[in-house]
Image (cartoon, grey):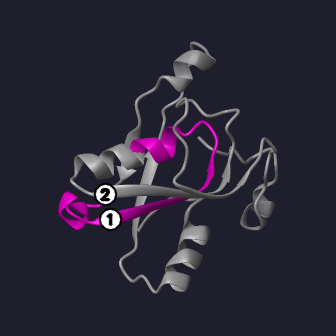
Amino acid sequence: MVLITRGGIIPGGMLAEAMGLTQILTAAVDFPGQVSGEKTKLMAWPEFLQFPAEELLRGRPTLIVDDVWGSGRTITAVKNRVSAAGGFPETCVLHFNPYRNMFGSLRPDYYAAVTDAYIVYPWEIDRGPDHVILGE
């Protein structure tokens, strides 16, 4: 299992416990902002701040967990990198927002609900709605 920081840590930890998984890895991804406009920002290449070594992923089924699939950029970048390492990725989120999805008909393999709502999860309350960006 690969948990995407920070949003995937709590749901992924709960899933790992329920499934009895002991091999839990993390991936941290940043999409550097650019000043020249929203469209340019969305086209930025991902920067992997942290990612598991290829030998930990090669030949293994890998569940990638995040809290939400908004635009889908982060989880898709992680999925593609797991696949490039020779792993067999599947994606899992709590909420899927098809209205913000940048990847056409591509959607998470597993999700609890479809929504277009702005969600602040219980573990994000102290950050407040003005400080939480979902699905990036």
Q: Nearer the viewer, residue 49 or 4?
A: 4
- Image coordinates of residue 53 in percent, x first then y, are 23, 60
Could you tell me which quadrant the C terminus lies in?
top right
**Residue 88's disc number:** 2
Label 1: which secondary element: strand
Marks 1 and 2 close (CB-CB < 8 Å): yes
Outermost residue on the top side: it is 36
Q: Nearer the viewer, residue 39 or 92?
A: 92
Q: Amino acid at mark 2?
A: Phe
88 on left or right of 31: left
- Residue 10 picture quarter: bottom right
In the rendered structure, does residue 50 fall within the stretch colored magenta? Answer: no
- Image coordinates of residue 98 in percent, x first then y, are 67, 38
In the rendered structure, does residue 57 fall within the stretch colored magenta? Answer: yes
135 on left or right of 90: right
Read off the residue under disc 1.
61
> Is residue 34 among what the camera can see?
no
Outermost residue on the front side: it is 105
Q: Which residues are magenta?
A: 52-77
Q: Nearer the viewer, residue 54 or 47?
A: 54
Q: Amino acid at mark 1?
A: Pro
Q: Nearer the viewer, residue 120 or 87?
A: 87
